[in-house]
Image (tube, grey):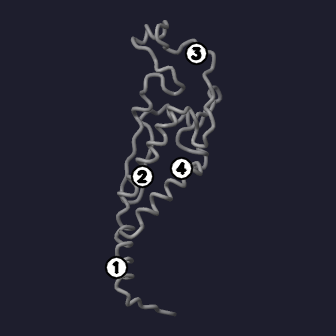
Amino acid sequence: MLIIRAEDTALRDYLQKLQERLNELTPAMAGIGAELESRISARFETQTDPGGNSWSGWAPSTLRSYPFAGSKAAAQAGKPGHGRVLDRYGDMLAGLSHQADASSVQVGFDRAYATFHEFGTHKMPRRSLLFDNPYSSTLAPNDAQAVREILSEFLMPA
């Protein structure tokens, strides 16, 4: 067995700081959560999935029941809709949040129906917000790159 001893004070200090940062990743995880939340929120505006592909439009049955300003559906609902795919009243977007701790971050929605949009159903096309591939839970390449950049910045010496 080979043992290498570092007598370099700067190197030891750097390794100590790195060890401390690796033991407390909450700030990095919070940064990742905030970045992904921002990216997901922007997808409501661009109406695109994480890979930049446009979401499918509404089915004719959805258009008939959508509460556009001045429509019968809006009168019944007591308010007009926003007129955007996945953004009828803003409820789903308002429920977007993240939670971070020392070893993980969770990003998602407080509405159970968000799952149907992420995966699609036999009656509704997939309109992804979170994953490039929801079955493997993989991020789109540009989202994964953003995560790597946040981690790299966090681990750089101060």
N-terminal-most mark, 3 or 1 = 1
Looking at the picture, how far across and down is residue 1, in whole percent?
A: 51, 93
Name the residue rendered at 60%, 22% in the picture. Answer: 58
Q: Is residue 139 left or right of residue 112?
A: right
Considering the numbered disc 2 on the image, is that residue within a helix, a strand or a loop? strand
- Residue drawn at 43 percent across, 26 percent down: 90
Q: Residue at x 63, y 37 (%)?
A: 53
Q: Report the Cα–Cα distance between label 4 and label 2.
A: 14 Å
Q: Are marks 2 and 1 in contact (CB under 8 Å)?
A: no
Looking at marks 2 and 1 on the same chain, the residue that comes earlier in the sequence is marked by: 1
Q: Amino acid at mark 1?
A: Asp
Query: Which amino acid type corresponds to the residue marked 2 in the rendered image?
Result: Val
User: Which residue in the protein does label 4 denote?
Assistant: 143
- Picture quadrant of residue 117: top right
Say few, some or many: other residues with alpha carbon within 10 Å of mark 2 (under 14 / 14 to 19 / 20 or more): some
Q: Is residue 106 left or right of residue 86?
A: left
Q: Secondary structure at mark 3?
A: helix
Q: Dot 2 corresponds to which residue?
A: 105
Q: Are marks 1 and 4 in contact (CB under 8 Å)?
A: no
Q: How many angstroms separate mark 3 from mark 1 (CA)?
A: 62 Å
Quadrant for the C terminus in the image: bottom left
Alpha-carbon span between mark 1 and mark 4: 32 Å
